[in-house]
Amino acid sequence: VKKTLFGRMNPFPQKKIITFNKHTNDFDFHVNYAELDYLPANEVISIGDLHLSTISLSGVAEALEKHANEGAESKGIKVHFNIDDSGVLNLLTVELVSEKSSTVDEEEGTFSILGSTISKFFAGSSLEKETVEKTEEPSKEDIKPVHEPEFSESTKETDEKEKKKSETKVNEEKTANKTEKTDKEKKATIVQIKEPISSKEVKLGSQILSGEKLTETRDKIHHLDVHDSEKARRETALNNLESYVIDAQQKFDSKEFSDAATDKEIEEVRKACAEISEWLYEDGFTATAEVYEEKLMELQKLTNDVYERVSEYRDRPEVLNGMVSLLKGSRLFLENMRNLSLTSEVITSVEIETLEKAINETQDYYDIVSKYFVDAPLNIPVKYKIRQIVNKMDLLDREIKYLLNKVKIWKPKQETTANQTTDSKTERTIEENKESTTNSDAKNDKSAEEQPSDNVEEQQQELISETTDTTQDPLQLPENEKPLTKEEVQKETHHEL
């Protein structure tokens, strides 16, 4: 009998179980490669021995007999395998699995019997008490008129009592039968029993390495890793050298790079590229990575100066335009700061002079640089590099950011003198109005009633104008009092009037 354990294209790591149902004694089974028809014959031969291992099981009959004596039913011998992360097949465990049905015994203990009888006794007595109480209580609906004979009531009551007693007896018998049936019922559960089986595995294929063989194998793997890294380094260096040579030849044939190089530089670069190309196609394919890297560095030394000039020529206009924009913004900021310094102490005169000096220096530097590159040829070393221009711009930008942050942080002082004067004058006018109104009311109440309402508005306007006119007089309030606003002054004045 053959069983497939791990099929083709199965992922790993993975676990599998094989069950043997018919074996009742000790037995052996073999683990082999199978279904290799998809491989060519030469690859099958390179695999080697297709027989991987032989596994012997012992103690099978004893385990089956043990489970049979316990009333268990055998479900077979289960053998557990797994393939680890390295793709190696391993035997894990072997066990006999049986199932046993467990039931509740019919015979109960004395305590459980006594408990059931006592509970039945109290249940029966309670039922009788309830029926007696129900029969003894006369219902209000059964009360008859006085003119009816008395014997009819007594006969009816006795009949009803007999009927109820018979009904209660029937109910008690039914409940007793039900409890007896439920007590006799059995609860069956299935329990699984596992018994380990001793196993012995004899591996016929590759064995686990140890000792000297393990050390030799590790050294061999290390040498292979070094060889692979050297091979990758050599291929990368060869590819970089070939691509750089071809790129340099194409660039120096263009007008942009030929204008940025002298005749001597062009001749040296072209000569070096030709020599390296000829060497590569004749003797260079057997060279090491160090030789390729050395030749690449020699060619880069010849071309770096020309490549730098071209890069500076391409990026310089954008940087100079940025400097022009920075100078325009700096001048506008300087004008605004000068206007602000007339009315506040946010920025001092020394800081304004420092900013103006930085702007003038940056402007002079821009004029010199722009004038120089108008007449300077492209094939000479760069005098003013982009890095130097950017550093000059950073000095001016840092000065502007310092002053701008100072303006943002600055908070104007609160003008408290004007509000204090308004508050004092308001209090004076309120007191004067109180005295005048009390005197006028005491002298003549009728005259106050005959005055038109326009006089009140005129007085309010006069008070408001008076308070606003007197805001120039300085007057200090106590520290714990706050000055009133114009709206609060108007409300208080109107309220007093």
Image (cartoon, rainbow, N blue to C red):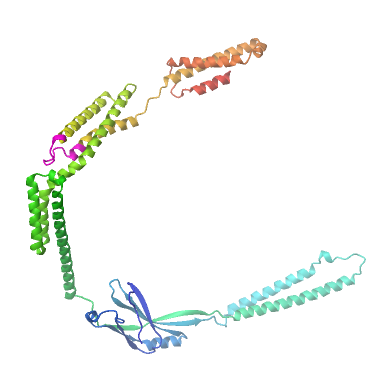
Pick whichever, 346 or 56, lies toward us. 346
Part of the protein shown in magenta: 374-390
Q: Residue at x 66, y 14 (%)?
A: 449
Q: Residue at x 40, y 88 (%)?
A: 22
Pick whichever, 113 or 459, lies toward us. 459
Residue 14 at x, y percent in the picture:
34, 73
Tell me the quadrant of the picture where the C terminus can be found.
Answer: top right
Task: Using residue 163 as the reference point, say whether residue 461 is left or right of it.
Answer: left
Any part of residue 394 in sight: no
In the image, is residue 386 part of the stretch drawn in magenta?
A: yes
Q: Residue at x 50, y 14 (%)?
A: 466
Residue found at the very far top of the displayed protein:
443
Task: Examine the image and state in which quarter residue 476 appears.
Answer: top left
Residue 319 at x, y percent in the picture:
22, 38
Task: Using residue 247 as the reference point, say whether residue 450 is left or right of it.
Answer: right
Task: Examine the image and state in which quarter residue 179 appears.
Answer: bottom right
424 vs 32: above or below: above
Pick whichever, 337 or 179, lies toward us. 337
Tell me the quadrant of the picture where the N terminus can be found.
Answer: bottom left
Task: Examine the image and state in which quarter residue 161 appears.
Answer: bottom right
